[in-house]
Image: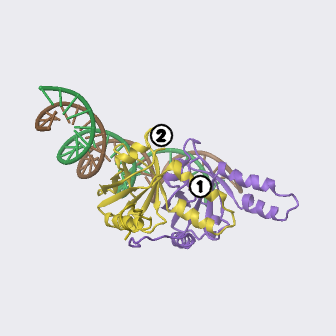
Chain colours: A yellow, B purple, C brown, D green
Amino acid sequence: MKQLFGKHENRLDAKGRVSVPAAFRAAWKGAEPAMTLVLRPSLIAGCVEGWPLPHYAKYEAELAAMDETDPNRQGWATKVYSDAVELEIDAQGRIMLPDHLAAEAQLTEAVCFLGRGTHFHIWEPAAAAAFLAATRALAPRLTFGAPAA
Amino acid sequence: MKQLFGKHENRLDAKGRVSVPAAFRAAWKGAEPAMTLVLRPSLIAGCVEGWPLPHYAKYEAELAAMDETDPNRQGWATKVYSDAVELEIDAQGRIMLPDHLAAEAQLTEAVCFLGRGTHFHIWEPAAAAAFLAATRALAPRLTFGAPAA
DNA sequence: CACCATTTCATGGGAAATCATGGGATTTCT
DNA sequence: AGAAATCCCATGATTTCCCATGAAATGGTG
């Protein structure tokens, strides 16, 4: 399955619907008719994470591998299943953002999709900019020829 | 079989009936007409656990693997079989919650279904919220300069 | 290279189907 | 027969589906 790239800003309508960026839909064309997605609050505070169902199997496998008596197991089951929603992309290429997810990520009118390879993030636009700036700073920058600051 | 996701609140009527969330029923569509479920008091105190019969086979296998002389075997057999009830979903998508299970989990008017992947929980709504909060705390939450919710 | 024709996107709103839930009517057991 | 459990129909609210539109992008052409 193709990877997810880029930054795309779309509008959330009165019914809680948003168009999934065409670039993302194109990446998983062929597995249809409609790709099933899983949405859940991200482990990174402040955004919603979206996964194509086939990739979400990674979490199922992690959970299955945990010991039955491991207390963390319930924690993961909550994050992976109870806090998540499974949904389909409609005929117009939109998804229905559930209220509790939108509220938690403070999504109102405009939302920002960030491609993250296997999955994507949905941020409030200003928060997305802050996240990008903060995380860019974590990766080293190389210089050649110019004196390093 | 598809996994069970999300949190769904439904009402328990005077006759002890509750609608099974449509999202759950959709997950096991195809095994019909009606999916058979197994309900039993959860090993996690305070809630009822519900299993689609096909997934319940996991317990049968675990029991079969236990040594005949293992004293735990009788304990498991009690929990897995004697305390459990097998029932069907009716034409309206509801199940009849047996009194002793409802009483044990203190279910009265409203009940909360939690998807847990292979199975689901039924909680009294306030208890569900507490359970979710407690288990979420077991998994870490990361922040990157973005405003924490 | 400029211009026009087509297609694709993103978005809005209204119609139709589904969901959850209540209240009988009928059957079964004692 | 009385009580209890089961089946069946009815209904409002919600959700899903479907059509329509403007903007933008794409492609082809003079």
Answer with left or right where residue B111 lies relative to residue B48: left
Q: Which residue is mark 1?
A: A60
Between the C-alphas of marks 1 and 2, the distance is 20 Å
Q: Nearer the viewer, residue B149 or B113?
A: B149
Residue A107 location (% of width, % of height):
34, 64
Q: Amino acid at mark 2?
A: Ala
Kindly identify which numbered label has been placed on residue A31: 2
Residue B18 location (% of width, % of height):
53, 58
Which chain does the numbered disc 1 sit on?
A
Answer with left or right where residue A42 lies relative to residue B105: left
Q: Nearer the viewer, residue B78 or B44?
A: B44
Q: Nearer the viewer, residue B15 or C24?
A: B15
In this rendering, is residue B144 above or below C10?
A: below
Q: Amino acid at mark 1?
A: Glu
Kindly identify which numbered label has been placed on residue B59: none
Q: Which mark sits nearer the N-terminus, 1 or 2?
A: 2
Answer with left or right where residue A108 lies relative to residue B10: left
Dot 1 crowding, Cα within 10 Å, few <14, some 14–19, many 20+: some
Residue B137 location (% of width, % of height):
54, 73
In this rendering, is residue B138 above or below B5?
A: below
**What residue is shown at x 59% (from left), y 60% (from top)?**
B97
**What residue is shown at x 49% (from left), y 52% (from top)?**
B23
Residue A129 location (% of width, % of height):
34, 65
